Image (cartoon, rainbow, N blue to C red):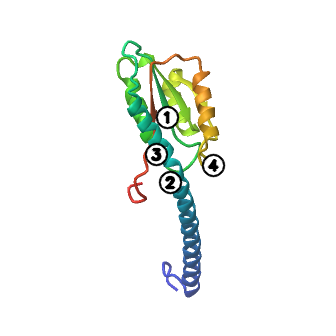
Amino acid sequence: QNRNMATLKAISIRLKSVKNIQKITQSMKMVSAAKYTRAERELKAARPYGEGAVQFYEKAEVAAPEDDPAQLYIAMTSDRGLCGAVHTGVSKVIRNRLNEPGAENIKVICVGDKSRGILQRLYGNHIISVANEIGRLPPTFLDAAKLANAIMTSGYDFGSGKIIYNKFKSVVSY
């Protein structure tokens, strides 16, 4: 037997481990596909609420007061997960705005631990509140009411606000 040559037994062990990894990967794909279809079904049910709110504010012709420079940003991220680009994309928009002049009038509410973790080190003085455990289940009016209550009781008097979030387009683009 040569020093670097694989034996027949080593090759069969390696083949068996590759087949086991293939089985695990296949089952993980099936689980993620099931989770995706469930999340897509729940998102379709919640989408009319957002579209209705947009139409309401367009028809109401509500505008922010021009003399009040105080702004509130709401960062919508999750508490955990391996989707780094989703979290950093939201945080990057807020970081860029906080680096511009006049950022002392901006406060941030973080929905999800990921945005808090990214923004807290450099911009902790801008964060006024953090909301956790939102979005784990399908969105409900109670979740929105809790968040609205946290905003209203935060003690920050703002003239305008923005919600920074990611919009889902397709599985391929995500």
The relative height of residue 80 versus residue 171 in the rendered view (above or below) is above
* Distance in Å between CA atoms under marks 2 and 3: 20 Å
**Mark before the other along the chain sequence, 2 or 3:** 2
Asked if disc 3 and disc 4 are in contact, CB closer than 8 Å, the reply is no
Specify the label residue 75 is tagged with: 1
Tell which of 163 and 14 is nearer to you: 163
Q: Which residue is mark 3?
A: 86
In the displayed orientation, state which residue is furthest to the front. 59
Q: Nearer the viewer, mark 2 or mark 3?
A: 2
What x and y, as percent, mark residue 169? 40, 53
Specify the amino acid type for callout 4: Leu
- As helix, strand or loop, the secondary structure at mark 2 comes to helix
Eyeballing the image, is 30 above or below 110? below
- On residue 137, which mark appears? 4
Q: Is residue 91 above or below residue 23?
A: above
- Using a 10 Å C-alpha cutoff, classify the residue at mark 1 as few (fewer than 14 neighbours), some (14 to 19) or many (20 or more): many
Q: Earlier in the sequence, mark 1 or mark 4?
A: 1
Residue type for callout 3: Val
Q: In the figure, residue 38 lies in which quadrant?
A: bottom right
- Residue 77 visible? The answer is yes
User: Residue at the location (52% across, 20% down)?
Assistant: 125
Q: Nearer the viewer, residue 47 or 39?
A: 47
Q: How far apart are labels 4 and 2 at the CA level?
A: 14 Å
Say which residue label 2 marks.
44
Q: Farthest residue in the top direction?
A: 67
Mark 1–mark 4 Cα distance, whole angstroms, equals 18 Å
Work out whether residue 162 or residue 89 is closer to the camera in this orientation and state it.
162
Q: Residue at x 47, y 37 (%)?
A: 53
Which residue corresponds to the image point at 55% horizontal and 63% vertical from the top-left?
A: 32
